[in-house]
Image (cartoon, rainbow, N blue to C red):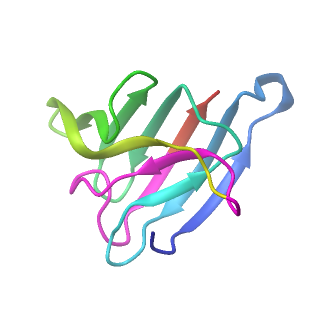
Amino acid sequence: MADAVIALNESPKIVSDVVTGKITAANPAVAINVSIGFIPSRVEIFNYTNPSQHNWQKGMGDGYCEQQVTAGDKTIVATGGISEYAGSASAAPGFTIGTDSVLNTAADVLYFKAYR
């Protein structure tokens, strides 16, 4: 996985089951593991650079997500979308942002919400 700038913002205690953050994708874009301390049941990502919304929820296949672009068209991404990330010896669990060309391209700024 490439280095990416990831800034996590823990939500207020009252909604402690939600983590938000901002990611600046590496250049060139590759898959990004986002370690948040748990495997989420739902992930919402807004691509600020390439305006589009991407949603994934538990039960969807690895690399899948629902995608909506500025024009309003909704599609299902079947590869290069969002996946669970089990973590590693040195990184907490979370999710992986794949390499779909609308979701994640070089230097894109992404904002996310991950729900426990």
Q: Is residue 110 above or below residue 86?
A: below
For image coordinates 72% across by 27% down, the residue present is: 17
Q: Quadrant of the C terminus?
A: top right
Q: Position of residue 101 (x, y in %)?
A: 21, 57
Q: Which residue is farthest right?
A: 13
Q: Is residue 89 above or below residue 17?
A: below
User: Is residue 109 toward the left or the right of residue 34 in the image?
Assistant: left
Most frequent secondary structure within the magenta stretch = loop
Which contiguous range is marked in magenta? 89-111
For image coordinates 38% across by 31% down, the residue present is: 55
For image coordinates 75% across by 37% down, the residue present is: 11
Q: Nearer the viewer, residue 11 or 88?
A: 88
Q: Nearer the viewer, residue 48 or 5?
A: 5
For image coordinates 78% across by 29% down, the residue present is: 16
Instruction: State which quadrant residue 62 falls in.
Output: top left
Q: Is residue 4 magenta?
A: no
Q: Position of residue 77 (x, y in %)?
A: 21, 38
User: Is residue 69 toward the left or the right of residue 60 in the image?
Assistant: left
Q: Which residue is farthest front?
A: 89
Q: Is residue 110 magenta?
A: yes
Q: Position of residue 104 (x, y in %)?
A: 32, 58
Q: Position of residue 59 (x, y in %)?
A: 40, 21
Q: Quadrant of the N terminus?
A: bottom left
User: Is residue 96 toward the left or the right of residue 10 in the image?
Assistant: left
